[in-house]
Amino acid sequence: MQVHVHSPSLTSLRRLAKALQRGALVAIPTETVYGLAAHALDAKACRAIFRAKRRPANDPLIVHVLDLAQAEQLAEFNDTARRLARRFWPGPLTLVLPKKNLVPGVVTSGGPTVAIRAPSHPLARRLLRLAKIPLAAPSANLFGYISPTTAEHVREGLGRRIPHLLDGGACPVGVESTVLDVTNPGKARILRPGAVTADQLGRFLGRKVPTARSRHPQAQQLAPGMLERHYSPRTPLVLRRPAGKLPTGVAAVFLRPPGKKNLPHAFWLSRRGALKEVARNLYEVLRRADAGGYRQIWVEPLPAEGGGLAAAIHDRLKRAAARKRGR
């Protein structure tokens, strides 16, 4: 099988909406990363997502919906969750809530809760309108590897494993959505930091919102993105700011261009270190470094206590640098 890359025309969107209704897989752009979408209420289609990605069955899927009304057909919303959806949707905030019976167990990895969000990307929203179904859509890459933020990234990773890819250009946010557990509305907690920050959530809810710890690979997951090791290049990644000359075979990734000009094997994430640009470019730059044939990639770390978007970037780099179990 060779993936068919579709342009974002109305004809293509209608064709892809029908393919999704029939149970086909379609890689789609969202504002965060590209997702591998399937009919969220079709258990067979959702199982195909796990096979295509080589994703373990204990890692649940995020369900994408058009709006709060559609979301309430799938999950038991409390007043806090409704307020959050009205404030931050459409956008990069995923809410974890008790699921309703029509959501297949494969979507939630057999758990009682479902992770759900309304994306803001215009093509994802047009497709949701045309298809008139919720879409389960984890990142459109092989499990554990760097998430895709362009159609070319998807083609490189899944080009022989899926039938359809909608090319919507580069994703504007560049890191996955914030995942917030609101099953207990008085004790909301962040399961995965993202572009909707802890500060924003705390101000809106009127209280500090804590972040949950990572989980063991074999543990039951409430939502995706909670594993200790994830978003990882094949080349070993080390969080370390290079000082002086780089060792042989090492690439360096800086937040902004290094002071030394013409430093060999150097990459940078932003001209001025702006966090939105760092997040948008993070996965693209890690992929380029990973393709360079290096023995290690050193990445300038952000402070662990950094607030705002820095928390999401630090989270992705920490997981990308985590060692595989048994090493």
Image: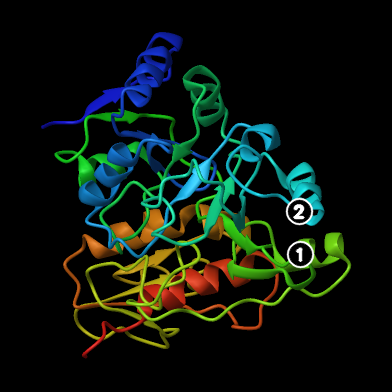
Mark 2: which amino acid?
Asn
Residue that appears at 67% across and 39% down:
90
Pointer 1 with pointer 2, Cβ within 8 A: yes
Residue wearing tag 1: 185
- Which residue is nearer to you in this view: 121 or 117? 117
First along the sequence among labels 1 and 2? 2
> Dot 2, crowdedness within 10 Å: few (<14), some or many (≥20)?
some
Farthest bottom residue? Answer: 327
Q: Secondary structure at mark 2?
A: loop
Q: CA distance from mark 1 to mark 2?
A: 7 Å
Q: Secondary structure at mark 1?
A: helix
Q: As drawn, is 163 to the left or to the right of 240?
A: left
Residue wearing tag 2: 78
- Image quadrant for the C terminus? bottom left
Residue that appears at 77% across and 67% down:
199
To which quarter of the image does residue 253 belong? Answer: bottom left
Residue that appears at 49% across and 40% down:
102
Across and down, in percent, residue 114 comes to 53, 54
The answer to whether any part of residue 294 appears in the image is yes
